[in-house]
Amino acid sequence: MTDLNIGIIGAGNISKTYFEMSPLFDGIKVVAVADLNAEAAARAAETYGVRALTTDALLADPQVDLIVNLTIPAAHFEVARAALLAGKHVYSEKPFVLSVEQGRELQAIASEKGLRVGSAPDTFLGGAHQQARALLDAGEIGPVHSATAHVMSAGMEHWHPNPDFFFLPGGGPILDLGPYYIAAFVNLLGPVARVTALTGMASAERVIRSEPRAGERIPVKTPTTIHALLQFASGAMVTLGASWDVHGHRHGNMEVYGAEGSMILPDPNFFGGPVEVSHRGEALAPVTTWDHPFAVPNETANGVARANYRAAGLADMARAIREGGDFRCDQSRALHVIEVMTSILQAGETGEWITLTTTCTRPEALGPDATQALLRAEEAAPAARTA
């Protein structure tokens, strides 16, 4: 199989994951990197054995088939647009745009040029959330009527070396972390019909706690606490809490409630983790982890083994480019997630219910066999690494 040649734009923190994970997958090969900081691009190029180019040179390179856009959220649209106009497919980190209008413009350009656009997150393709999907599809807990999700912490300034953009428009816990949860729910339940929310912030500024800028104060220009209600087209009702103003809590990441039972799911920011199920009149109990390649731990972080297969969505997109057909992290689902999130923020300002203008299909389930087909043959049992 001929690999699609990948060019990465953005050599920041997340690029390490794409450089190190992409070799696991069939059909993709990173060949070049660009960054506004030429030194950062040069370091990445030397570390991973690729070419360091300027952004313009990378976009003009006829050997590059697909751009992975790892710039900051505020730059995602312009970089993706430039890549499409240069004749490149685009896969972006989340959120791939900051408005529905931007997303529709990218869709139009891609359609005109016969190109594909995809977007992270792809963690809903992980073994845990795909096992949950299989259980729901099999009617394990009956029809789903409601669910809850909570993603709450004290914020990003405690660990990130340059956390400024997290607290500016385009950042915040909904646009930064919401994609994991909403994409996971779309995988389980399908599209959202309408939303409403309450939003606010605990402080108008934050103090950076991480080096090298510890003690520096930065402004907060976007909501940092959000309580949202989502009604899905299926009728299911979901409560979503997202905050960077919480210093401790006991809420689970995701819980799904059906007519005949309940299901507890792990953090959708990751590929693995325990799934628990209860049936009518019974206590919650762990489900035996199924034999799924993306449930296999392949790295150790802080002494804990975990599964990390980021770039799976990119590999699935590359398969669709070669073979035709749909891919699971396609722009229609990504745009729907964008509208859900931006509508939540809008509802926080207006206090209204907002009916969505976009919709999408549920992504096709990714079972063990289809997952193995995405991996290079030698990666049938991925070796562990230290994150």
Image (cartoon, rainbow, N blue to C red):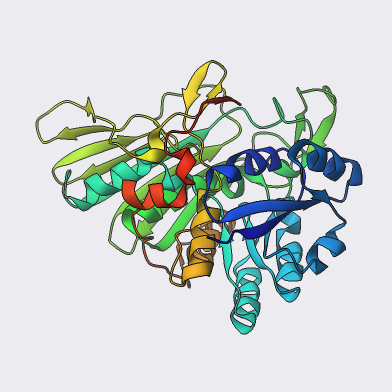
How many numbered marks, from 0 up? 0
Residue at image location 42% in from the left, 48% down from the top: 125
Residue 42 location (% of width, % of height): 86, 42
Q: Nearer the viewer, residue 68 or 62?
A: 62
Identify whether 348 is placed above or below 267.
below
Q: Nearer the viewer, residue 382 or 197?
A: 382
Identify whether 302 is placed above or below 20.
above
Residue at image location 17% in from the left, 44% down from the top: 140
Residue 7, quarter of picture: bottom right
Farthest residue to the left: give it: 281
Farthest residue to the top: give it: 303
Residue 310 location (% of width, % of height): 54, 43
| Residue 367 in view | no
Residue at image location 90% in from the left, 46% down from the top: 38
Identify whether 325 is placed above or below 119.
below
Horizontal side, residue 82 vs residue 346: left or right: right
Residue 176 location (% of width, % of height): 61, 45
Residue 360 location (% of width, % of height): 42, 68
Which quadrant of the figure contains the C terminus?
top right
Q: Nearer the viewer, residue 108 or 364?
A: 364
Q: Nearer the viewer, residue 241 or 10?
A: 10
Horizontal side, residue 38 vs residue 205: left or right: right
Horizontal side, residue 341 vs residue 165: left or right: left
Farthest residue to the right: give it: 38
| Residue 271 in view | yes
Residue at image location 74% in from the left, 39% down from the top: 48
Residue 240, quarter of picture: top left
